[in-house]
Image: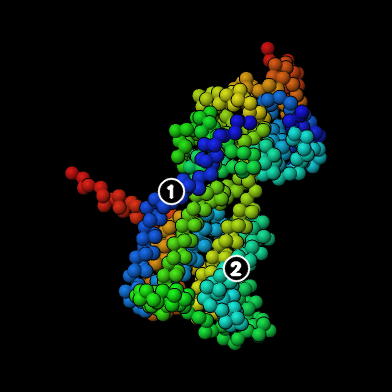
Amino acid sequence: MTLLEVAGVTRSFGGNRAVDDVSFRMEVDTLAIVGPNGAGKTTLLNLIAGWLHPELGAITFRDQDVTHHPPWRIAQLGMVKTYQVVRPFRTLTVQENLALFGKKRGVADLDRILEVTGLRDVRDHLAGALPFGLLKRLELAKGLAAMPDLLLLDEPIGGLSRAEAQGLVASLTALKSSGVRMVIVEHRLSEILPVVDRVVALDRGRLIFHGTREEFFQDPAVRTAYLGSSDAAG
Amino acid sequence: MLPEGGPRARRAASPLLRTARRTVLSPTYLFAIALIGFVFYAASGSPDSFFAYSMVLASIFITLALAWDFSSGLTGYLNFGLPFFFGLGAFGAGYLSWHGDRVVPELLVFGFAVGLFAGFLFSIPTLRLRGPYFSLLSLLLPIIGTDFVVAFWAQLHLPTEGYYSLPFLYTFWTPVVQSLSPLHLPIQYLATTNAGELLLLSIVNGVLLTGFLLLRGSHFGLVLRGIRDDEDALGSQGIWTFPYKVTAFTLSSGVAAYAGAAYATTVTYSGVDTFQFTFILFPVLIVILGGLGRLSGSVLAGYLVIYLYQYLQPVFSTATLIIFSSIAILLVLFVAGGLERPLRAFIQFMRTPEAG
């Protein structure tokens, strides 16, 4: 069964087509959405999660049309988004941040989530007092606490140091092994690609590539978008 | 998806018992409950004194402050319409007493029910708006309420000066005192003095404080506090916030209306002036002083603010409100988190041994 299907999705802001007739299917564990700045990655993720609605096209999750559903309903169906700019509940503790999920999808094992995300030692700290690196982890943990069938991660390692990013990528790898399925939007390709099975690449709102990560670097359109010319890379 | 948690995880996610234990062991909660008991004890020594009457009024405004703090303090949706529900409760109690010759418990329950119903009707359309827009709309509510009552007073066949001769709040205890009279307990004064009123209001405030604190620590309360921090982020967690907000504001309106009914039976009168907009000043001032969203702090702050107001009122007359409004502004500017933090800092300072 197709987990997620995006069919002909288009969304403009003013005269600018941020996402232009994008279509793909997700039948694997982990998918990366990549592209240069302004490619429309975050807009596409917001369209999938219900924070924006497309002008054209349809989004289907588990064979159910979710194109015009509000975000909370999409999250209840099992597709949960985390934020690029972290949005913790600052006056609540880490544990309370995780306890704050809709219970319709069952009750998550918070100890396990704290363990996997490396937040066990700060579980009683106020989220507002955490450093940025831990807030990024908390963002991931909040997503997991909602018991998602598909986790939509918007630049999970964006802004992190190399060491912090490595730690978080290790958490993502562990989650993938545990059966958590993810769509990851990320700039830092070399660090995130080892985690993913397939890649969707956008450029100026249009889909330029959809295939395996091995095929990704060989694709001429991708090389043009990233390097300016398909011959540029040696 | 990670595997679902077992029974232990389910217990951890339904933290009612843990919340209850943490609530009743909290020093601020214990202090607030002890203070309520102490004020009643102190007032019952001279049950018809100025102090006792001031504490009765303070207790009513503490109820109003708890209602305001529970909805607005926890969610960050500032509701300035609370005086409308307070007035509605007073008005409802007056109406029922005037037309139905009912006893005090019926008037209080009726006031509460009217507040719940009106609060629900008010919440459904207005809580679709976000914070500042909701606050603006709620600001209009007491004005609309007052103007409506004034404009249609005669058409509604209401008594010229408002509803007067309501039964005294202390008559709540009359059946209790009568039924216990064979035991010759020294409790007759409860059915005839301010001490009786204070006892009833204190019990209700204790129950409300406990109930609100338990709700604050529950999943429901977490959602309300999450709304204050970042309402959109809750949507990403699969939480539709609208029913939570409606429930909190409906409950808060009911409690405010109960406070109005209690006020009407304390002064044995309800009329247009029970819709006064200035009634919002006291709960807001009490909550700022007690700490927004902290609930327990409102008890001490309530007794302090109202006693001070009652004390200054004969001296400064109408200027008292100006003084209190100025105090509110200063508090927001300099002690926005309430008195708890400065008090703790002071205690810490006093405990610290002198250097050298």
x, y (%) of residue B137? 63, 64
- Same chain, marks 1 and 2? yes
Q: Residue B54's mark?
A: none
x, y (%) of residue B172? 47, 75
Give left or right: position of A191 versus A232: left
- Measuring 40% from the left and 55% from the top, which residue is drawn there? B29
Chain ID of residue with mark 1: B
C-alpha span from label 1 to label 2: 31 Å
- Measuring 81% from the left and 34% from the top, which residue is drawn there? A8
- Extreme residue in the front direction: B182
Q: For this rendering, which residue is in front, A76 or B96?
A: B96
- Extreme residue in the top direction: A234
Q: How many marks?
A: 2
Do the residues under discs 1 and 2 have CB atoms within 8 angstroms?
Answer: no
Q: Disc 1 or 2, which lies upstream in sequence?
A: 1
Q: Residues within 10 Å of mark 1 (few under 14, many from 20)?
A: few
Q: Which residue is mark 1?
A: B21
Give left or right: position of B72 versus A16: left
**For numbered disc 2, what is the local secondary structure?**
helix
Chain ID of residue with mark 2: B
**For numbered disc 1, what is the local secondary structure?**
helix
Give left or right: position of B280 versus A228: left
Q: Which residue is mark 2?
A: B113
Q: Is residue B353 visible?
A: yes
Q: Is residue A16 visible?
A: no
The quarter of the image holding the N terminus of chain B is top right
Residue A186 falls in image quadrant: top right
- Measuring 60% from the left and 65% from the top, which residue is drawn there? B116
